[in-house]
Amino acid sequence: MMKYLQNLGRSLMLPVAVLPVAAILAGIANWILAFAEESVIANFLLFGSDAILGNLGILFAVGVAIGMSKDQHGAAGLSGLVAFLVVTFTLETEGVAVLQGIDEGSVNTAFENINLGNVFTGILSGIIASIMYNRFSHVKLPDAFAFFSGKRLVPIMSAGAMLLVSAILFFVWPAVYTGLVGFGTWISNMGPAGAGLYGFFNRLLIPTGLHHALNNVFWFDLAGINDIANFWASEGAQGITGRYQAGFFPIMMFGLPAAALAMYHTAKTARRKQAASLMLAAGFASFFTGVTEPLEFSFMFLAPLLYVVHAFLTGLSLFIAAMFEWTAGFSFSAGLVDYTLSLAVPIANQPYMLLVQGLFFAALYYFLFRFLIQKFDLKTPGREEGEAVETAGSDPAPAASADTAAAQEDDTTVMAKQIYEGLGGDENVTAIDNCVSRLRIEVEDMDQVDQEKIKATGIPGVNVVGKHNIQVVVGTQVQFVADEMIRIRDTE
């Protein structure tokens, strides 16, 4: 079950990755509108942005279907779209009114939300389509129906399955939707404290990948909050819209890079140069793009106490930003790029105060992390036990030979080869996949995995998530490493 939920979390990143496009379009449009109240170009760009934000359901249906299918084939994406169209058109307000024999004005408002922008409907459609693809994509029908065999059968089965799901939703959806709205309303009614609790649990769930499920409640239109889309559309109440995003900026742009500096300063002298390389890259990624996993995974399992402190400080940041009603928004993550774009959005409220708050959190993270690392001798990067095992009694000739070979190859190729060998190679690796910053690997025997060899490549960390599942945190270049590992596997 955990593996399935983690795969779902990974699959959600595919449609989420599209959102920066909408943010760029909306940001440029708002920059233009800041100087010209009427602009054809600005409105043209805003229409382009709305084309994405107004159709999130379709994006999630296709993205989840592809991501959850066993070989990520395009036929799964088509099936996700078919499934989504079936449920949305079957349960649209007009159709429900006919089925219930009432006028459209009397239809439960829950059905108004099973539409093109509904993320929950999109995710459900994608899951159904992926199940159908994994089950029927290789089914052979009798000769009379052979044309519909294999992958052509999947959209048909997806449509049929979604009709059944639509019948269930016809009775269940109003109660489920009301419950989700009630949950969202409960959190919203807690005001700044609710934002703080969200930030705390958001970080705690990062190791499992289940933070995406929590994000969907607050960032998208799953429970009526829809914080991201409303912010970029500049809808809602100023100082309120964006409260589930703003507090992340001080953490990702200031707090975590300061934590990286603290870990560098507390690294052992012999390992400080290596720690600097890791901390600089991970800290910059956090500051500039808001991608925090390379940095977080570098200490998450080495020093769990620090990670709990980090989660608490994230919740505190969201609480403070929400309490003072300082708001900014993001489409991908809370880095400098999205912060700059959000400045031009009219509904942003005192966003520059988030920089002041960020400086406070930078100092807090630095001194608190440094104190805890030294006080409890926490094994952060550069402080691990037995880190210099490779020098004693080794023959220098093979090392020189390896260096010569490495110099002739691309760095990504070298890293991919070493990670693949550390995982056990062809005999042990059964599946290779990746999300935004992590390799997601399935292996036959975890005992054959050489974690030290993998870590020797300089990656931030390794996370064993099950008997046959392991994650290797690479960073923002993970796709190229994964592609190279797949090439190695297929050619050997």
Image: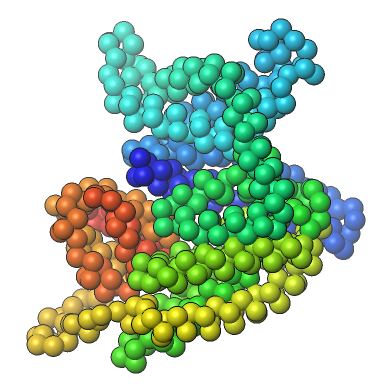
Q: Vertical placement of 227 versus 127: above or below?
A: below
Q: Where is residue 426 drawn, in percent x and y?
A: 17, 53
Left or right: residue 17 versus residue 235 is left
At a point 51% along the width and 25% down the height, the residue shown is: 83
Nearer to us in this view, 421 or 236: 236
Give the quadrant of residue 27: bottom right
Q: Is residue 214 rendered to the left or right of residue 406?
A: right
**Residue 320 place in picture, x, y as percent:** 69, 66
Q: Which part of the image, by quadrant, shows the C terminus?
A: bottom left
Report if residue 58 is visible in the image: no
Q: Position of residue 165 (x, y in %)?
A: 50, 21
The single residue placed furthest to the bottom in the displayed view is: 269
* Above-or-below relation of 179 to 174: below
Give above or below for 281 relative to 14.
Answer: below
- Tell me which residue sits at (35%, 71%) in the image: 302
* Residue appearing at x 19%, y 61% in the figure: 449
Pinpoint residue 339: horizontal percent, then vertical percent: 67, 66
Q: Quadrant of the N terminus?
A: top left
Q: Is residue 87 visible?
A: yes
User: Residue at 47% of width from left, 66% of height from top?
Assistant: 308
Q: Along the line of sight, which residue is nearer the eye, 201 or 18? A: 201
